[in-house]
Amino acid sequence: MSGGPSTPVDILPGQPPVGEHGALSCGKELAFSAKAEERLQKLLTRYPTKQAALLPTLWIAQEEWGWISREAVDYVAARLGLTSAFVWGVVTFYTMYNRAPVGKHLIQVCTSISCHLNGAEEVFHECRKKLGGLKPGETSADGKYTVVEVECLAQCDKAPAVMVNGDDHERITLDKLDAFLAELR
Protein backbone atom coordinates (compact mmCIF):
# COMPACT_ATOMS: atom_id res chain seq x y z
CA MET A 1 0.00 0.00 0.00
CA SER A 2 1.01 3.62 -0.21
CA GLY A 3 1.48 4.18 3.49
CA GLY A 4 -1.74 2.54 4.61
CA PRO A 5 -5.25 3.94 4.78
CA SER A 6 -4.57 5.78 8.03
CA THR A 7 -1.32 7.45 6.93
CA PRO A 8 -1.94 11.08 5.93
CA VAL A 9 -0.65 11.80 2.46
CA ASP A 10 1.38 14.79 3.64
CA ILE A 11 3.66 12.58 5.77
CA LEU A 12 4.41 9.95 3.16
CA PRO A 13 8.16 9.93 2.53
CA GLY A 14 9.10 11.99 -0.50
CA GLN A 15 5.49 12.46 -1.65
CA PRO A 16 5.83 9.91 -4.47
CA PRO A 17 3.78 10.85 -7.53
CA VAL A 18 2.87 7.21 -8.03
CA GLY A 19 1.73 4.77 -5.35
CA GLU A 20 3.19 1.34 -4.90
CA HIS A 21 0.18 -0.12 -6.70
CA GLY A 22 0.75 2.19 -9.68
CA ALA A 23 -1.92 4.84 -9.15
CA LEU A 24 -1.17 8.54 -9.55
CA SER A 25 -1.42 10.66 -6.42
CA CYS A 26 -3.91 13.50 -6.04
CA GLY A 27 -1.75 14.81 -3.19
CA LYS A 28 -4.39 14.94 -0.47
CA GLU A 29 -6.28 12.75 1.94
CA LEU A 30 -9.75 11.82 0.75
CA ALA A 31 -13.08 11.08 2.41
CA PHE A 32 -16.57 10.79 1.00
CA SER A 33 -18.92 13.73 1.35
CA ALA A 34 -22.06 13.18 3.42
CA LYS A 35 -24.06 12.59 0.23
CA ALA A 36 -21.57 10.03 -1.14
CA GLU A 37 -21.38 8.34 2.26
CA GLU A 38 -25.16 8.01 2.30
CA ARG A 39 -25.06 6.46 -1.18
CA LEU A 40 -22.35 4.02 -0.06
CA GLN A 41 -24.30 2.92 3.02
CA LYS A 42 -27.44 2.32 0.94
CA LEU A 43 -25.38 0.50 -1.68
CA LEU A 44 -23.80 -1.85 0.87
CA THR A 45 -27.25 -3.12 1.90
CA ARG A 46 -27.84 -4.38 -1.65
CA TYR A 47 -24.80 -6.68 -1.87
CA PRO A 48 -24.00 -9.90 0.01
CA THR A 49 -20.40 -8.82 0.69
CA LYS A 50 -18.44 -5.59 0.64
CA GLN A 51 -16.22 -6.99 -2.11
CA ALA A 52 -19.30 -7.46 -4.30
CA ALA A 53 -19.96 -3.71 -3.94
CA LEU A 54 -16.53 -2.71 -5.26
CA LEU A 55 -17.52 -1.63 -8.80
CA PRO A 56 -20.37 0.67 -7.73
CA THR A 57 -18.24 2.01 -4.85
CA LEU A 58 -15.57 2.95 -7.38
CA TRP A 59 -18.27 4.74 -9.41
CA ILE A 60 -19.19 6.75 -6.33
CA ALA A 61 -15.51 7.59 -5.80
CA GLN A 62 -15.06 8.64 -9.42
CA GLU A 63 -18.21 10.79 -9.32
CA GLU A 64 -16.98 12.35 -6.07
CA TRP A 65 -13.39 13.09 -7.11
CA GLY A 66 -13.44 12.92 -10.92
CA TRP A 67 -10.87 10.14 -11.18
CA ILE A 68 -9.40 7.22 -9.22
CA SER A 69 -6.19 8.40 -7.57
CA ARG A 70 -3.81 6.49 -5.32
CA GLU A 71 -5.62 7.94 -2.33
CA ALA A 72 -9.01 6.95 -3.76
CA VAL A 73 -7.78 3.37 -4.22
CA ASP A 74 -6.54 3.26 -0.62
CA TYR A 75 -9.73 4.88 0.70
CA VAL A 76 -12.06 2.48 -1.13
CA ALA A 77 -9.91 -0.48 -0.12
CA ALA A 78 -10.04 0.53 3.54
CA ARG A 79 -13.79 1.18 3.42
CA LEU A 80 -14.50 -2.24 1.91
CA GLY A 81 -11.88 -4.23 3.84
CA LEU A 82 -9.92 -5.08 0.69
CA THR A 83 -6.28 -4.67 -0.24
CA SER A 84 -5.25 -1.69 -2.32
CA ALA A 85 -3.65 -4.08 -4.79
CA PHE A 86 -6.97 -5.85 -5.32
CA VAL A 87 -8.83 -2.57 -5.84
CA TRP A 88 -6.13 -1.29 -8.21
CA GLY A 89 -6.37 -4.56 -10.17
CA VAL A 90 -10.08 -3.91 -10.70
CA VAL A 91 -9.51 -0.25 -11.61
CA THR A 92 -6.94 -1.20 -14.24
CA PHE A 93 -9.06 -4.03 -15.64
CA TYR A 94 -12.04 -1.81 -16.47
CA THR A 95 -11.60 1.11 -18.84
CA MET A 96 -14.57 2.97 -17.34
CA TYR A 97 -12.46 4.23 -14.44
CA ASN A 98 -10.32 7.32 -15.03
CA ARG A 99 -6.81 6.73 -13.69
CA ALA A 100 -5.78 10.34 -14.19
CA PRO A 101 -7.59 13.68 -14.03
CA VAL A 102 -9.83 14.32 -17.04
CA GLY A 103 -11.40 17.43 -18.50
CA LYS A 104 -14.92 18.67 -17.90
CA HIS A 105 -15.89 16.89 -21.13
CA LEU A 106 -14.45 13.38 -21.42
CA ILE A 107 -14.83 12.58 -25.11
CA GLN A 108 -14.51 8.87 -25.86
CA VAL A 109 -14.29 7.93 -29.53
CA CYS A 110 -14.96 4.30 -30.40
CA THR A 111 -12.54 2.87 -32.95
CA SER A 112 -13.75 -0.75 -32.99
CA ILE A 113 -14.42 -2.34 -36.37
CA SER A 114 -17.84 -0.81 -37.20
CA CYS A 115 -16.77 2.65 -36.13
CA HIS A 116 -13.37 2.27 -37.77
CA LEU A 117 -14.98 1.36 -41.09
CA ASN A 118 -17.15 4.47 -40.82
CA GLY A 119 -14.29 6.93 -40.25
CA ALA A 120 -13.75 6.90 -36.48
CA GLU A 121 -9.95 7.15 -36.80
CA GLU A 122 -10.30 10.37 -38.76
CA VAL A 123 -12.88 11.70 -36.29
CA PHE A 124 -10.55 10.87 -33.38
CA HIS A 125 -7.63 12.65 -35.06
CA GLU A 126 -9.62 15.73 -36.16
CA CYS A 127 -11.36 16.06 -32.79
CA ARG A 128 -7.99 16.23 -31.01
CA LYS A 129 -6.67 18.63 -33.64
CA LYS A 130 -9.67 20.98 -33.33
CA LEU A 131 -9.34 21.03 -29.54
CA GLY A 132 -5.78 22.34 -29.64
CA GLY A 133 -3.73 19.49 -31.05
CA LEU A 134 -4.25 17.23 -28.06
CA LYS A 135 -2.37 13.97 -27.79
CA PRO A 136 -4.51 10.89 -27.08
CA GLY A 137 -5.69 11.08 -23.46
CA GLU A 138 -4.34 14.60 -22.97
CA THR A 139 -6.49 17.28 -21.33
CA SER A 140 -6.77 20.73 -22.88
CA ALA A 141 -4.95 23.57 -21.10
CA ASP A 142 -8.28 25.08 -19.99
CA GLY A 143 -9.29 21.75 -18.40
CA LYS A 144 -12.40 21.45 -20.54
CA TYR A 145 -11.62 18.53 -22.85
CA THR A 146 -9.98 15.12 -22.74
CA VAL A 147 -10.18 12.94 -25.85
CA VAL A 148 -9.56 9.20 -25.64
CA GLU A 149 -9.89 6.25 -27.98
CA VAL A 150 -12.02 3.40 -26.65
CA GLU A 151 -13.08 -0.04 -27.72
CA CYS A 152 -16.75 -0.64 -28.49
CA LEU A 153 -19.44 1.62 -27.10
CA ALA A 154 -22.07 -0.96 -28.18
CA GLN A 155 -23.45 1.34 -30.88
CA CYS A 156 -22.21 -0.48 -33.96
CA ASP A 157 -25.42 0.35 -35.83
CA LYS A 158 -24.82 4.07 -35.18
CA ALA A 159 -21.13 4.27 -36.07
CA PRO A 160 -18.99 6.19 -35.59
CA ALA A 161 -20.04 6.40 -31.97
CA VAL A 162 -18.82 8.88 -29.37
CA MET A 163 -19.57 9.09 -25.66
CA VAL A 164 -19.23 12.31 -23.67
CA ASN A 165 -19.44 12.00 -19.88
CA GLY A 166 -21.60 8.91 -20.19
CA ASP A 167 -23.94 10.32 -22.86
CA ASP A 168 -24.03 8.52 -26.20
CA HIS A 169 -23.71 10.41 -29.48
CA GLU A 170 -24.26 8.64 -32.77
CA ARG A 171 -22.93 8.97 -36.29
CA ILE A 172 -20.33 11.63 -35.44
CA THR A 173 -18.66 11.93 -38.83
CA LEU A 174 -16.14 14.52 -39.98
CA ASP A 175 -19.07 16.47 -41.51
CA LYS A 176 -20.81 16.65 -38.12
CA LEU A 177 -17.73 17.15 -35.92
CA ASP A 178 -17.78 20.96 -35.80
CA ALA A 179 -21.47 21.08 -34.80
CA PHE A 180 -20.87 18.32 -32.23
CA LEU A 181 -17.96 20.20 -30.63
CA ALA A 182 -19.93 23.48 -30.70
CA GLU A 183 -22.61 21.82 -28.54
CA LEU A 184 -19.97 21.10 -25.88
CA ARG A 185 -18.69 24.66 -25.67
Image: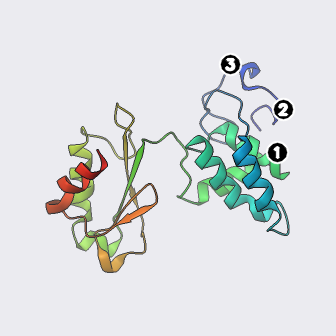
> For the point 78% across and 65% down, which residue is it?
52
Q: Provide the secondary structure element on which disc 2 rests.
A: loop
Name the kind of residue labelled 1 in the image: Ala
For label 3, the crowd category at 10 Å Cα-Cα, with few meaning under 14, some 14 to 19 and many 20 or more, is few
Q: Nearer the viewer, residue 125 or 78?
A: 78
Q: Which residue is mark 2?
A: 6
Name the kind of residue labelled 2 in the image: Ser
Name the kind of residue labelled 3 in the image: Gly
Pointers 1 and 2 in contact (CB under 8 A)?
yes
Q: Quadrant of residue 157?
A: bottom left
Foreground disc of the pair 3, 2: 2
x and y percentages locating residue 18 in the rendered image: 62, 33
> For the point 72% across and 26% down, which residue is it?
9
Q: Which tag, 3 or 2, sits closer to the chain's start?
A: 2
Query: Is the residue 51 above or below the residue 147 in the image?
Result: below
75 vs 19, left or right, is right
Q: Which residue is mark 1?
A: 78
Q: Residue furthest left?
A: 175
For label 1, the crowd category at 10 Å Cα-Cα, with few meaning under 14, some 14 to 19 and many 20 or more, is some
Task: Report the quarter where the C terminus lies.
Answer: top left
> For the point 37% across and 39% down, which residue is it?
144
Q: Which residue is mark 3?
A: 14
Foreground disc of the pair 3, 1: 1
Q: How is the image coloured?
A: rainbow
